[in-house]
Amino acid sequence: MQKLTIDTGMQEYLINNRAVLRFNPGDPNLYKRFFTAASQLDALDAELTEKLKALPAEPNLARAGQGLALLTDYDRRIKALLTEIFGAENDFDKVLEGVNLAGCGANGKRVVQNLLDALTPILQEGAARHLKNTAAAARAEADAARAARGEA
């Protein structure tokens, strides 16, 4: 059997020196999924905020249990969305060491926001590189066509 290796542009990112996230930052499909999901992420965040506000005002075990259930559901739904974006080979429970994405980092932002903030510039750079390469290929094709027609 012969081997065939195809450059798919996949790159690996070591997250918090523990787990690896794999994706192609120049993949237009991934870029589209990522930025299309922004509105879904905002909607999930708003839904969680409203549901947490609707919990009974008096702290008690029932309220705490309901709040934890909401946070667990949010975490599950966000991780499912991230899996849709980045592929099933990326286990976000493993990548983020089981941390609930509704939790806050030391900077006061939700963990999911910290993740998105870290990934956004990588995907923007990948998309820019893809567009630059596509434009260069189109320019080379146009130059070759002009040369074939004898134009200068």
Image (tube, helix red, strand yellow):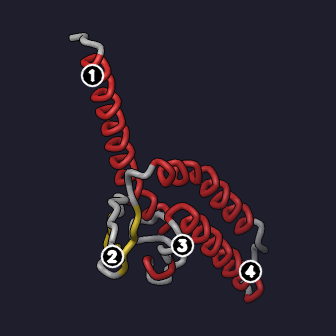
- Closer mark to the observer between disc 2 and disc 1: 1
Q: Earlier in the sequence, mark 4 or mark 3?
A: 4
In the image, residue 10 lies at what x, y percent? 36, 63
Q: Return the mark for residue 88.
A: 3
The Cα atoms of the two marked residues, 2 and 4, are separated by: 31 Å
- Closer mark to the observer between disc 3 and disc 1: 1
Q: Quadrant of the C terminus?
A: top left
Q: Secondary structure at mark 4?
A: helix
Say whether residue 137 is left or right of residue 85.
left
What residue is rendered at 33% in x and 47% in y?
125
To which residue does mark 1 refer? 143
Q: Earlier in the sequence, mark 2 or mark 4?
A: 2
Q: Nearer the viewer, residue 66 or 92?
A: 92
To which residue does mark 4 refer? 66
For badge 2, the amino acid type reads Asn
What residue is rendered at 25% in x and 10% in y?
151
Q: Return the mark for residue 16.
A: 2
Residue at the far bottom: name it.
61
